[in-house]
Image: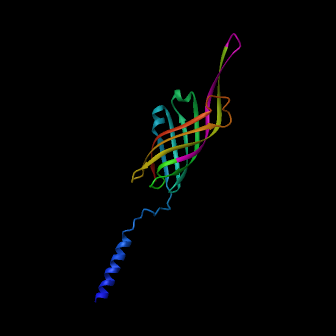
């Protein structure tokens, strides 16, 4: 009788110890899509929309598109298209602190003044260039999939930096979005 009772108690304790395990190390193999809108640029007069796809719990790739609608911004920047890769350091799936590497196809306006002694001539030239850069930021996600994100990145134009004032480019974001 004592042996049976000891066996039942031992079995019950071992089963309960298995149920105490946490699922912290278990990750999902399902990847997510995200759509985001940069609120900072929206206030300043431009639309900056981002699509991101998670690869695994630590990384994602995406693309963002910037188009100005305010004449003050449109006088200098025509557009940019920027693909990126991010590596995340957070506890949630593809969230938390991140570093990114990005490329950026950008179009800017350059203004040149020339004078022949009598007349001053003002010329506007559209210049398209490609930049490579790095950035960092943080992403926070609610249980319902809403996203808040802060990011900052800098890069260098590779081809036409001697022809215009945009040798160094920047990406800044105060972004909201949704993961599905």
- Residue 157 sits inside the magenta stretch: no
The residue at the far right in this view is 116
Q: How many marks?
A: 0
Q: Which residue shows up at 49% across the image and 42% down it?
A: 151
- Magenta stretch bounds: 99-119
Image quarter of the N terminus: bottom left
Give the vertical position of 116 relative to 76 (above or below): above
Measuring from the top left, give residue 165's x and y in whole percent.
62, 28
Measuring from the top left, give residue 78's x and y in whole percent.
58, 33
Q: Which residue shows up at 36% across the image and 76% down it?
A: 14
Measuring from the top left, give residue 97's x and y in whole percent.
48, 48
Residue 14 is left or right of residue 60, and the answer is: left
- Residue 107 sits inside the magenta stretch: yes
Residue 69 is left or right of residue 168, and the answer is: left
Q: Which residue shows up at 57% across the image and 43% down it?
A: 134
Measuring from the top left, give residue 8's x and y in whole percent.
32, 82
The residue at the far top in this view is 118
């Amino acid at each position: 009788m004592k042996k049976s009772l000891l066996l039942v108690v031992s079995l019950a304790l071992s089963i309960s110890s298995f149920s105490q395990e946490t699922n912290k190390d278990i990750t999902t193999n399902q990847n997510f899509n995200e759509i985001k809108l940069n609120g900072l640029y929206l206030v300043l007069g431009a639309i900056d929309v981002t699509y991101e796809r998670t690869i695994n719990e630590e990384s994602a790739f995406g693309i963002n598109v910037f188009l100005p609608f305010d004449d003050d911004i449109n006088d200098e920047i025509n557009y940019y298209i920027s693909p990126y890769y991010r590596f995340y350091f957070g506890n949630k799936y593809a969230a938390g602190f991140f570093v990114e590497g990005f490329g950026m196809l950008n179009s800017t306006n350059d203004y040149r003044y020339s004078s022949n002694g009598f007349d001053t001539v003002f010329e506007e030239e559209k210049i398209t260039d490609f930049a490579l850069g790095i950035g960092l930021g943080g992403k926070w996600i609610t249980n319902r999939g809403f996203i808040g994100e802060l990011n900052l990145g800098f890069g260098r134009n590779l081809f036409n930096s001697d022809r215009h004032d945009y040798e160094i480019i920047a990406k800044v974001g105060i972004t909201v979005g949704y993961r599905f």
